Image (cartoon, rainbow, N blue to C red):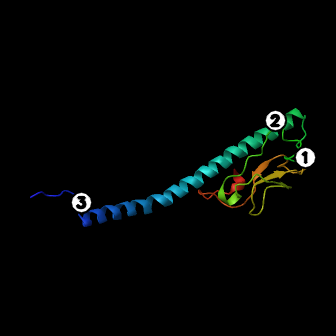
Amino acid sequence: MLKKKGFTLIELMIVVAIIGILAAIAIPKFAQMLEKSREGATKGNLAAMRSAVTIYYSEKEGTWPGDLTTSFTSYLYPIPPAKATPLGNVATINATGGVPAAAGTGWAYVTDTTSTFAGNVFANSTGTDTKGSSFTTY
């Protein structure tokens, strides 16, 4: 008599249950890793924008750009997006008089030349990242 080799139904069900448990543990960690990478990209893009604004300031001999959309494009084009989820993954720039005081999207650029934050670029939200830090502290 020929004996067939293979897995029993119980063995297959146990394997499927173990894979399901591992997936239930891994998926939330994967989502958190994705958000951390978006926050890292936001920090990198913010550093690039701040560097471009500083170069503009030094080349124009102490004059901050009036806005970051028209005459600024030769220094940084295109404007990179604020990739963190609470910031909307958009490249919009909101002119402001100081540090953002509410939740928003995109970037905030301080155009008030009398402000101590004149010429600074911020992530435009008082929301917090995965570590609990406010986006305005970036």
Question: Residue 21 has which mark?
Answer: none
Say which residue label 1 marks: 66
- What residue is shown at x 63% (from left), y 48% (from top)? 40
Can you give x and y, in whole percent of width and height, for residue 19 in the image?
Answer: 37, 60
In whole angstroms, how far apart are the C-alphas of marks 3 and 2? 67 Å
Quarter of the view holding residue 52? top right
Please say if the residues under marks 1 and 3 sit with CB atoms less than 8 Å apart.
Answer: no
Number of numbered callouts drawn? 3
Can you give x and y, in whole percent of width and height, for residue 81 in the image?
Answer: 72, 50
Q: Earlier in the sequence, mark 1 or mark 2?
A: 2
Can you give x and y, in whole percent of width and height, for residue 86 in the image?
Answer: 68, 60
Between 54 and 85, the residue placed more toward the observer is 85
Number of residues whose C-alpha sits closer than 10 Å to that of mark 1, classed few (under 14), some (14–19) or many (20 or more):
some
Q: Vertical placement of 57 versus 34: above or below? A: above
Please say if the residues under marks 3 and 2 sit with CB atoms less than 8 Å apart.
Answer: no
Please say if the residues under marks 1 and 2 sit with CB atoms less than 8 Å apart.
Answer: no
Side of 31 where 84 appears, left or right: right
* Residue that extends furthest to the left in the rendered view of this protein: 1
Say which residue label 3 marks: 7
| Amino acid at pointer 2 | Ile
| Discs 1/3, front | 3
Say which residue label 2 marks: 55
Can you give x and y, in whole percent of width and height, for residue 96 in the image?
Answer: 85, 56
In whole angstroms, how far apart are the C-alphas of marks 1 and 2? 14 Å
Q: Name the secondary structure under disc 1.
A: loop
- What residue is shown at x 63% (from left), y 51% (from top)? 39
Q: Earlier in the sequence, mark 1 or mark 3?
A: 3
Number of residues whose C-alpha sits closer than 10 Å to that of mark 2, classed few (under 14), some (14–19) or many (20 or more):
some
- What residue is shown at x 39% (from left), y 63% (from top)? 20
Q: Quadrant of the N terminus?
A: bottom left
Q: Name the secondary structure under disc 3.
A: loop
